[in-house]
Structures are given as structure tokens and as C-alpha cells.
Image: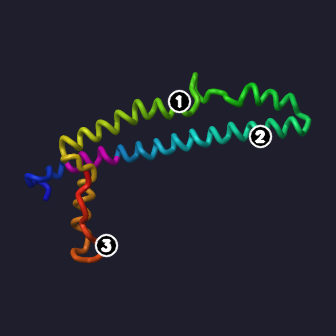
């Protein structure tokens, strides 16, 4: 029960819930960043195939230009996508994730989804198969 000695008050649960929601949004953004990384790499290899086909089709000038100007080009100053992903993971993402874990450890005994645990308690059908409470999250 919220407000009892074993669980924080509703305002704390709500605040940590909002923080966790923000982290989950960052997790989605991170997934998109990895998709960007994979798609950019896939496009770069497809450019290599396009260069081969342009050469075979008798267009060596275009093939040379794509090969020297576009294939392997940095996506940002001095960085390929893997470097962007690593910088994001080591910086913003790592800090965000660590801070969220620290707040949850301090305020909700490490339970990130305490709000959802409360919802599950209220919305499940006691004794019905598939509606078991299960272990608390950590």
C-alpha cells in the first residue's frame, strides 16, 4: 500500500514513474539511433554495388565520384555512425540510465515500475490463472 512503511507515498511513486517513463522514451530513441546506424551502413554497402553497376554500364566517372566522395563519408564531423552510437551510449544514455537507477534505488527500493505494480494489484482477478501477482520488480 502506498504510504505504508514498505512503500513510498503516491507522489514519490508518481515522480519515479515519470522518470522511468522518460528513460523508456530514451530507450526508444536509442533504438532509433541504432536503426539509423544499421540503415546508414546498409546504404553505404549498397553504394558499393551501385558503383560496380555504374562501371559495368559504362559510367566510370559517376562510379569514381560516388566511390571517392560518398562511400565512407563521415555522417557527422569526424564520425561514422558507430562512433555516434558509442558517444551517445557512453554519455547521455549512460548518465540517464544510471541516474534513473540511483533514484529508484534511493526512493523505491530499486523498483522501477512500482506504479505498474500497483495497477496490476488493482486490475488482476485474484485466484484466476494468468493473473498471478508474481515477484516484485527490481
Of residue 38 and residue 29, the one placed in the foreground of this image is 38
- Dominant SS of magenta comes to helix
User: Badge 3: how crowded within 10 Å, few (<14), some, or many (20+)?
Assistant: few
| 65, above or below 135, in the image | above
Q: Position of residue 75 (x, y in %)?
A: 60, 30
Residue 103 image offset from top left, x and y in percent: 23, 40
Q: Which residue is mark 3?
A: 130
Residue at coordinates 18% horizontally, 49% vertically from top-left?
11
Identify the residue position indicated by label 2 in the image: 49
Residues shaded magenta = 13-21
Image position of 103 (left or right of 57): left
Q: Are marks 2 and 3 in contact (CB under 8 Å)?
A: no
Measure the alpha-carbon separation of dots 2 and 3. Answer: 52 Å
116 sits to left or right of 23? left
- Name the mark on residue 83: 1
Q: Quadrant of the N terminus?
A: bottom left
Q: Residues within 10 Å of mark 2 (few under 14, many from 20)?
A: few
Crowdedness of circle 1 by 10 Å Cα count: few (<14), some, many (20+)?
some
Q: Viewer-proximal residue, 64 or 77?
A: 64
Amino acid at each position: 500500500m502506498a504510504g505504508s512503511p514498505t512503500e513510498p507515498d503516491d507522489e514519490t511513486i508518481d515522480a519515479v514513474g515519470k522518470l522511468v517513463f522518460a528513460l523508456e522514451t530514451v530507450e526508444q530513441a536509442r533504438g532509433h539511433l541504432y536503426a539509423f546506424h544499421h540503415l546508414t551502413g546498409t546504404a553505404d554497402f549498397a553504394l558499393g554495388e551501385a558503383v560496380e553497376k555504374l562501371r559495368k554500364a559504362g559510367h566510370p566517372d559517376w562510379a569514381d565520384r560516388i566511390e571517392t566522395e560518398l562511400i565512407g563519408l563521415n555522417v557527422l564531423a569526424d564520425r561514422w555512425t558507430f562512433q555516434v552510437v558509442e558517444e551517445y551510449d557512453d554519455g547521455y544514455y549512460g548518465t540517464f540510465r544510471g541516474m534513473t537507477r540511483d533514484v529508484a534505488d534511493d526512493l523505491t527500493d530499486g523498483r522501477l515500475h512500482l506504479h505498474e505494480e500497483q495497477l496490476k494489484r488493482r486490475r488482476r482477478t485474484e485466484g484466476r490463472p494468468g493473473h498471478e501477482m508474481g515477484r516484485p520488480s527490481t
